[in-house]
Amino acid sequence: DAPAKKKPPRKTCNCWPKWCFMCCGSRKKNRKVNYGPRKQIINKDVAKQIRALETIEEGIEGIDNEKSSLLSQLKLEKKFGQSYVFIASTLMENGGILKAATSASLLKEAIHVIGCGYEDKTEWGKEVGWIYGSVTEDILTGFKMHSHGWRSVYCMPKRPAFKGSAPINLSDRLHQVLRWALGSVE
């Protein structure tokens, strides 16, 4: 999970000076809220619901381990997708790969996970996944991840892990620069 970041209190507009808030500020400060007995009734209802959930949880503990592990497996699949190796790697404390996995199975799983449709309908795809529909989806995805509190680390190994490809002739190069410019304007 991304590190939690405290958000500053919101104002109507951050660009207005403080003196302007005195004359055009929110009226919510002057309004008094009276909760009275209604709040107590709501609190009692919430307490009843919590007690009911606790009794349900106590009943679930009695279910066979197979059923409870199946439920947790379904929750993990809903969150991270249907790759068993990827789900298992999320459960490992320091990351890494499964000891029983072969290189062929890892390659197959990697191809499955990097596919276009893997993150569809998963919580992981909504929270961490790519932003599609733009020429520069990698930049937008990076901005989205940084706004959620993730950090980027510059890594330059001795042996390059990935090598990019660039257009060779001038017309292709200009077309690529135009694409980048349009994506930045988006």
Image (spheres, rainbow, N blue to C red):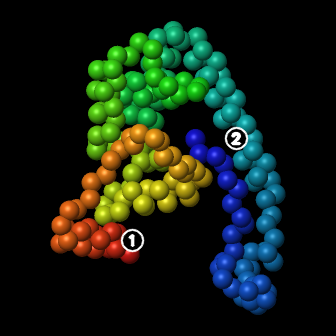
Residue in view at x 73 percent, y 37 percent = 47
Q: What residue would you read off at disc 1? A: 184
Give the residue at x 79% y 75%. 29
Quadrant position of residue 148:
bottom right
Q: How many marks do you count on the picture?
A: 2
Relative side of 167 to 46, left or right: left
Residue 76's x, y, as percent? 46, 29
Which amino acid lies under the numbered mark 1 shown in the image of this protein? Ser
Query: Closer to the observer: label 1 or label 2?
Result: 1
* Image location of residue 84, percent across then percent down: 39, 24
Q: Would residue 127 be seen by someone viewing this image from the given angle?
A: yes
Quadrant location of the C terminus? bottom left
Picture quarter with the N terminus: top right
Q: Nearer the viewer, residue 163 or 185?
A: 163
Residue 3 in the image, given as x and y percentages of width and height: 64, 46
Q: Which residue is mark 2?
A: 46
Q: Quadrant of residue 117?
A: top left
* Residue 18 to residue 1: above or below: below
29 displayed left or right of 1: right
Residue at 39% x, 43% y is: 160
* Distance of label 1 from label 2 (alpha carbons): 49 Å
User: Which of pointers 1 and 2 lies earlier in the amino acid sequence?
Assistant: 2
Can residue 122 be seen in the rendering of this structure?
no
Q: Nearer the viewer, residue 36 or 75?
A: 75
- Circle 2 packing at 10 Å, graded few (<14), some (14-19), many (20+), is few
